[in-house]
């Protein structure tokens, strides 16, 4: 396990959990995969905090390729 690539910080997790579940479900099911060429579901993802956003990094549920999604934060 790579520390730099698969760490969900407590703070990032708290921010993620603060997002309504319904919206979170939409976000994880609407991640762009370049290989599949469209919106896919992200699985096995970790959450990182960027400056003013959350970054989800994980794998495409369909093809297993690494995918990522930025979730803008206030
Ligand atoms: Zn894919």
Image (spheres, grey):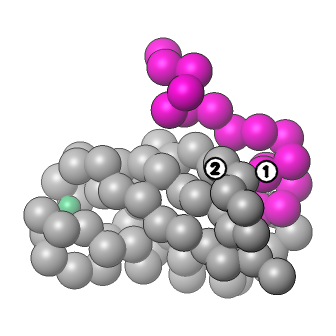
User: Can residue 51 be seen by looking at this rendering?
Assistant: yes
> Marks 1 and 2: in contact by CB < 8 Å?
yes
Rendering quadrant holding ligand 1? bottom left
The residue identified by callout 2 is 47
Question: How many callouts does the rendering have?
Answer: 2
Q: Mark 2 falls on what kind of element?
A: strand
Residue at x 22% of width, y 49% of height: 65
Q: Is residue 18 left or right of residue 22?
A: right
Measured in 3D between alpha carbons, the distance from the residue under mark 2 to the one under mark 1, in whole angstroms, is 7 Å
Taking depth in this image into account, of 60 and 2 the one nearest to the observer is 2
Q: Quick one: label 2, few (<14), some, or many (20+) residues within 10 Å?
A: many
Q: Which residues are magenta?
A: 1-16
Quarter of the picture holding the C terminus: bottom right
Residue at x 30% of width, y 48% of height: 66
Q: Is residue 33 left or right of residue 3?
A: left
Query: Looking at the image, is mark 2 or mark 1 earlier in the sequence?
Result: 1
Which numbered tag is attached to residue 13? 1
Q: Mark 1 falls on what kind of element?
A: helix
- Looking at the picture, does residue 8 appear above or below residue 59? above
Residue at x 48% of width, y 16% of height: 1
Return the x and y of residue 3 as percentages of the image width and height. 57, 21
């Amino acid at each position: 396990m790579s520390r730099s690539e698969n760490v969900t910080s407590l703070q990032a997790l708290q921010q993620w959990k603060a997002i309504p579940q319904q919206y979170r479900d939409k976000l994880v099911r609407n991640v762009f995969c370049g290989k599949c060429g469209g919106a896919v579901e992200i699985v096995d993802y970790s959450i990182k905090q960027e400056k003013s956003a959350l970054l989800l990094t994980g794998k495409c549920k369909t093809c297993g390729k690494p995918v990522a999604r930025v979730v803008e934060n206030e």
